Image: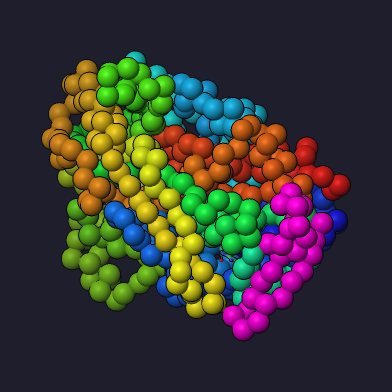
Amino acid sequence: MKIAVLGAGTYGSYVINSLIEKYPDAEITLFDVGDKNVKSEEQIGFYSKLKKAMYKGLTDGRFFGYGGASDKWGGQLLTYTDNDYHHPDAFMQGVINIDKARKDEMLAKFKIENKFPENHVSNELFTKTGVWLSALHRNFFHWFKIDKRQQVKIMNHSRVVRLESKNGKDIDAVVYTDGKSESKASFDYYFLTSGAFESSRILMSSGMMPEKVHFSDHLSMKVFKIKGSTVIGNEDFVFRMRGTSLITKRMIGEVTDVDADGKVAQKDYSFYVHPVFNLKFPFFVVMKEVLFKHHFELKYIWTALKDIPHCIAFAWAILAKRRMYVMDNEWFLYIDIENPSLESYISLSKEKDAFGVQGLDVYYDAGKETEFVFNEAKEDAIKHLTACNVKYDVLAEEINVQTCEDIYHPYGMFDFKDMNDYFTRWNNMLVVTTGCLSRSGGINPTAAMLPVVDEFIEKHLPNA
Ligand SMILES: Cc1cc2nc3c(=O)[nH]c(=O)nc-3n(C[C@H](O)[C@H](O)[C@H](O)COP(=O)(O)OP(=O)(O)OC[C@H]3O[C@@H](n4cnc5c(N)ncnc54)[C@H](O)[C@@H]3O)c2cc1C
């Protein structure tokens, strides 16, 4: 079977590794718009225009080339369990079931184990432990050595423009361009892994998605400053080292929305409360710049030299105590919520990008419901902090979308009825992006789709 993978990023690389694990004789053609130098939206020449409210998910959260966003991401791997949603829809229930069954197998591919239990710490909140991949191993393309696989033919500088299909169910060909002229190629099966927004753009341009595609994302606010221990109740929230990875912990809850008459609207919105350390520690800030953004300036060495005592304490904490250093015993709790607005969407722009292809207009909205969800989440967090005698300062009384921090977890772009609908929406194509999830819940959701990929490749890939 001839397989095309459209995008050499996080999911594309994972898909290829899983395909080859299961089918060592697979014949795979990998299309990518970039190459080994990972570029931003502006550098690669894609176009998006923000028409309403602040949202940097396209301009600052997209990366192009081998590894895609995994070249710059946090690399925190988290999956769902039965605790995440009170009322998951049928598709999310399918994701939960597969995550539970295949999480260990997925994590083992990164040489990671996560057997930490989730604990209900109050009526509203439970804990979830995550693993932050080592900064040295977070680009999936490099981790899975995709360029060394003899089964893979890499077509770089090949921008997928659209897909051709006569009946909307079977993909007949992929149309791609090198920026000068268009070419076409046909395969038996296609994996569309060009990122949430670009995959949607490709499907819109191919007449396989509506003209307006809804999406949502998390909104994140720094809410509490805590002076003192990192222990809340019986749980220590300090990050711990395991090998070169970090073990993280957060608290997750859900807010149930009520309508104007005070009736339950039967909609739940997830939120998570997570610790952030060393915001005022210049050496730590520049270290993150170097590790995550691969950005180095000589003045960073001076930054470290100016702050030798804290740097030594940091090194001691990491190397000897195997835990995150907490400068001046001061740390912060952020609250991230699912943005409840249904008014955020993308559509094809009139303007064309550097490839002569229509880009995306982006409308991002945060309405009244957003304040409601944020305030309820904050109340649940305060109740727990108070019950545990934690002393805190509240830094954000209300949510302010303009000062919300950038989170890049787009979801809610498709409407898969259940897992079977997802696996069979197209006869010879699977779309793999976080946009497929109907909700993101209280996690950074990328890894939650990886077990679903394995399930599909092992049990459902037709004619493999
Ligand atoms: C700073 C940052 C930190 C993050 N931290 C986390 C985290 O800790 N945990 C987590 O779960 N998530 C995190 N995320 C989100 C996560 O990075 C994404 O959900 C994930 O990388 C998406 O994978 P993808 O394969 O869909 O897209 P990408 O990894 O971006 O891959 C898309 C690939 O497709 C290629 N491509 C794009 N368009 C075309 C086209 N038209 N033709 C051909 N090729 C194309 C690109 O070159 C790229 O290689 C973070 C994101 C950012 C930006």
Q: Is residue 75 above or below residue 422?
A: below
Instruction: Residue at 51%, 37% (x, y): give it.
Output: 438
x and y percent of residue 251 in the render?
36, 30
306 vs 355: above or below = above
Q: Residue at x 60, y 37 (%)?
A: 416
Left or right: 423 as drawn, with respect to 371 = right
Magenta-drawn segment: 163-188
**Can you give x and y, in whole percent of width and height, for residue 370 in the image?**
29, 37
- Work out whether residue 148 or residue 418 is closer to the camera in this orientation and state it: 418
User: As drawn, is 11 to the left or to the right of 446?
Assistant: right
The residue most toward the bottom is: 180
Q: Is residue 455 left or right of residue 39?
A: right
Residue 303 falls in which quadrant of the image?
A: bottom left
Residue in the picture at 61% in, 43% down:
450
Q: Residue at x 58, y 66 (%)?
A: 66
Evaluate whether residue 391 shows in this view: yes
- 122 vs 360: above or below: above
